[in-house]
Image (cartoon, rainbow, N blue to C red):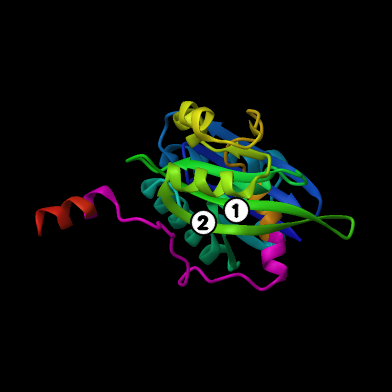
């Protein structure tokens, strides 16, 4: 099974092609450029480097959210266009699920933390358990937008050593150090941001379970209203 993965849910733009147990190519950029400037050139460069034939792609995986409103819309529009042009299914993957999958095989409780502004985070809780000759990822607390204190309370109540990762870690590092009561660690640089390769590998298992959609059916999952929507509600318009 060959999967094209695209993640534009945060500052990092990431594109990868994974075939079975092999990452054929991956391109990651974590720089202050809009994804509308980076994603298509990245895919074009990667496609040229690996001589990608669209006919060999089985599905297109995308980080469906939560995350940056603009980033999610750009990624969604790109994936919908590719899915229509190539006549391929879309495999939507929750952003924090894909982030947690970076820690595949860890015995720790896994807590992705994305900065959602206004002292909130996009987060969830995950664990890996042995299954066959690998590991299965269990979702212990499904993706949500909550205050940092709420997820720290869940972590403390678990009593388990926890690894934190995501762009919210440097934002909330001081608060985490002060208020987390269990043993913990912060994931290293090569594992702590969105990666399309992890997204694509997880998406392959979703595809085998039939968790796909068409271009017409796909839409980002924001979890919260945008700032513009909140301001309209507050102004009564």
Q: Residue at x 71, y 41 (%)?
A: 25
Residue 210: in magenta span: yes
> In this image, 173 relative to 236: left or right?
right
Residue 108 seen in this snapshot: yes
Q: Residue 59 placed where, x, y %?
A: 64, 62
Instruction: Report the residue that reaches farthest toward the left.
Output: 236
**Label 1 sits on residue:** 97
Instruction: Report the residue that reaches farthest toward the top.
Output: 174
Is disc 2 placed on a helix, strand or loop?
A: strand
Q: Is residue 210 above or below residue 164?
A: below
Q: Label 1 near label 2: C-beta < 8 Å?
A: yes
**Label 2 sits on residue:** 143
Q: Residue 163 placed where, x, y %?
A: 64, 38
Highlighted range, magenta: 204-229
Q: Mark 1 Cα within 10 Å, few/some/many (few <14, many 20+)?
A: many
Q: Residue 222 placed where, x, y %?
A: 40, 56
Q: CA distance from mark 2 to mark 1?
A: 8 Å
Residue 74: in magenta span: no
Q: Residue at x 63, y 37 (%)?
A: 182
Is disc 1 placed on a helix, strand or loop?
A: helix
Instruction: Report the residue that reaches farthest toward the right.
Output: 133
Q: Residue at x 74, y 52 (%)?
A: 128
Of 39 and 133, the residue lying toward us: 133
Residue 42: which disc? none
Q: Residue 156 placed where, x, y %?
A: 57, 44
- Mark 2 or mark 1, earlier in chain: 1
- The main secondary structure of the magenta stretch is loop
Q: Quadrant of the N terminus?
A: bottom right
Residue 53 seen in this snapshot: no
């Amino acid at each position: 099974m060959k999967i094209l993965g695209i993640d534009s849910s945060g500052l990092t733009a990431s594109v990868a092609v994974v075939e079975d147990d092999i990452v054929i190519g991956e391109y990651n950029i974590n720089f202050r450029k809009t994804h509308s400037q980076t994603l298509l050139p990245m895919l074009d460069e990667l496609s040229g480097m690996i001589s990608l034939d669209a006919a060999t792609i089985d599905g297109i995986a995308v980080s469906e959210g939560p995350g940056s409103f603009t980033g999610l819309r750009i990624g969604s529009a790109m994936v919908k266009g590719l899915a229509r042009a190539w006549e391929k299914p879309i495999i939507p993957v929750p952003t924090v699920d894909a982030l947690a999958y970076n820690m595949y095989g860890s015995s720790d409780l896994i807590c992705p933390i994305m900065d959602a502004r206004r002292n909130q985070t996009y987060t969830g809780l995950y664990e890996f358990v042995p299954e066959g000759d690998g590991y299965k990822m269990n979702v212990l607390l499904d993706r949500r937008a909550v205050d940092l204190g709420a997820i720290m309370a869940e972590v403390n109540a678990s009593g388990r050593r926890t690894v934190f990762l995501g762009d919210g870690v440097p934002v909330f590092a001081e608060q985490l150090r002060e208020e987390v009561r269990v043993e913990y660690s912060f994931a290293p640089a090569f594992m702590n941001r969105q990666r399309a390769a992890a997204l694509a590998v997880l998406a392959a298992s979703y595809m085998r379970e039939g968790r796909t959609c068409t271009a017409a059916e796909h839409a980002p999952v924001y979890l919260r209203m945008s700032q513009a929507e909140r301001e309209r509600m507050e102004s009564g318009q």
